[in-house]
Amino acid sequence: MTTPTPGPPATPDAMNEWPTGRLLSTAARLVEHAWVEALDRLGLTHAGLIVLHLLGSGPLSQAELAREARVQTQTMSRTLERLEREGYVARVRDERDQRRHSVTRTDAGTAAWKQARTIETDVFPQLNDGSALREALLAIISTSSARRW
């Protein structure tokens, strides 16, 4: 069985004929790849970036982080384990409740967070009206979410 050889990339003129959904899907995949590669260079994942963001306002418990990130506690545990291995977060047992750990962002975590803040401008093309794109994306997400959930 042979693997099909990909054809030449679509020209901008050919893409003008694509439906908006296909354009959005293609753009999303390309942005996702660039985003993941940029985070990987920092030793982060998308989930790890979310945690570092949430810890910017101060220490939180694993359960609080999971709730804020809208993930299961077990999922958050795996993310925290990786961040802790990388030296980006520290977990300290709560003196009042030995079952609870307080999670904080370390200096290395703060530095990684600050570096990650430039990914958007480093990866995405400069747009004349980025706020209009954001508004359109938020509207698409809101409408699509309402239909789905």
Image (cartoon, grey):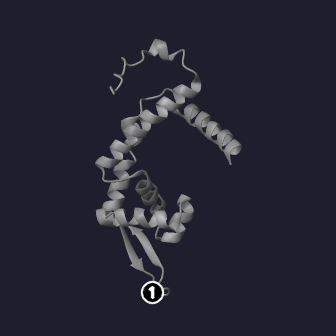
Q: In which quarter of the image is the N terminus?
A: top left
Residue at 53% over, 59% down: 69
Residue 129, can we see it?
Answer: no
**As displayed, is residue 44 above or below residue 36?**
below
Left/right placement of residue 142 relative to residue 111 reads: right
Residue at 56% over, 64% down: 67
Most foreground residue, 114 or 99:
99
Judged from this view, the residue extending furthest toward the front is 1
* Crowding near the residue tagged with mark 1, few <14, some 14–19, many ≥20 C-alpha atoms within 10 Å: few
Residue at which label 1 appears: 95
Residue at 48% over, 67% down: 74
**As displayed, is residue 110 above or below residue 46?**
below
Judged from this view, the residue extending furthest toward the right is 147
Most foreground residue, 8 or 63:
8
The quarter holding residue 12 reads: top left
Number of numbered discs: 1
**As displayed, is residue 17 above or below residue 131?**
above
- Give the amino acid at mark 1: Glu
Judged from this view, the residue extending furthest toward the top is 13
Q: Indicate the position of residue 98 as horizontal and vertical percent values.
A: 46, 86
Most foreground residue, 122 or 72:
72
Q: Indicate the position of residue 79 as horizontal and vertical percent values.
A: 41, 62
